[in-house]
Amino acid sequence: MHDRIERVASKVKTSQQLNFEGLSKNLIGAMHRRGELIRLTRGVYVSAAEGRQFTPEERCIAVTIALAMSHRQAVLSHASAALMWGAPLFGLPAKVELSLPRSNHRHHSQVRYHSSRSDVCELARVVAGFSVTDPLTTILDCARTLPVVQALAVTDYFLHHAHVGYRDVHAQLMGARGYGKSSFSLIAESMSALTESPLESLAMLRIVQSKLERPRQQLEIRAHDGRVHRSDFAWETLKLLLEVDGLHKYYGAYRPTEEQLRRDALRQRSLELMGWTVVRATWDDLMNRSQVVIQRLMHSGVRKLER
């Protein structure tokens, strides 16, 4: 992901950089009026030929980089930091989120400022040449500002890629006070370094919310032909699997392909021949009809936890 950000960043130029390349202020203005340059924000451009080839995500990255270039004392944070780290987002940030070490009275239509965060700014990391909040801070910021399932997907991403330790995240989430405390504890209970996609994050969230006994994740099952199948969620004593799939549109690290879905169908057939019951669920099932999935699991023997 960082290579992609660096590639996009290499195409984003400030007015000063364009001056060094031989373009005067008047020429830059003329090229912008002719549509040869796209202005991402004041004083920051990308060539129209390259900008038109950007995907929506790449354009969002370009605007994020442009605002970071024009706010050198700021640190990219919240969803903008998650974007730069490569974490999956269900929608691209409407505004670039910037944390500042001191109080701020500026206003910018493309920016959401977070002021007086000197401690956060001191802990910032450099990602592809830009100051970004560290993984733990990014997780906590997203937990405060994003819906639970989205914040959980970001948390799982950082855990899965070993950018941050489970105990550190758990302690910070469980120690939270005030607004958002219930969301923090739900994320802490649902998060896992074994979760490999946002859809798996959503599935685990629904399992935890329904107070079902927790399954094993990524269980490897050897088939009769020697192939090893890895399940999303497994209740071994019940020989029951929950497999999640779908082509939900999100931005970041995970995009299942049609070929992957075909392989999943063949894998399910193999597992059923071995005596496993396979419950499949899509993004729409888990988001809009989760009780149907939960009832199927309970009818197959999954118990509610006693609390």
Image: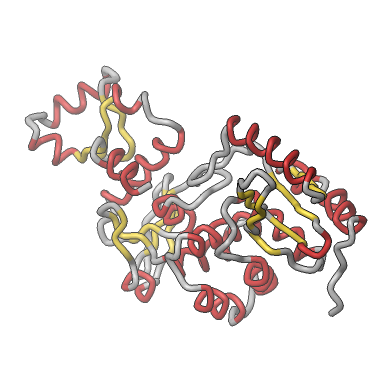
Image location (x, y in percent) of residue 137 = 45, 69
Quadrant in the picture for the C terminus: bottom right
- Work out whether 13 lies above or below 293: above
Q: Quadrant of residue 97?
A: bottom left
Farthest front residue in view: 225
Is 232 in front, or is 50? 232
| Residue at 60% in and 60% down | 152
Q: How many marks?
A: 0
Image location (x, y in percent) of residue 10 = 23, 39
Image location (x, y in percent) of residue 263 = 63, 35
| Residue at 89% in and 61% down | 301
Side (left or right) of 29 relative to 39:
left
- Work out whether 77 lies above or below 186: above
Q: Which color scheme does this rendered protein use?
A: secondary structure
Q: Quadrant of residue 134?
A: bottom left
Farthest top residue in view: 34
Side (left or right) of 243 relative to 116:
right
| Residue at 66% in and 73% down | 185
- Work out whether 114 lies above or below 229: below
Image location (x, y in percent) of residue 192 = 60, 65
Is 163 in front, or is 262? 262
Is 88 in front, or is 303? 303
Side (left or right) of 104 relative to 94:
left
| Residue at 35% in and 60% down | 132
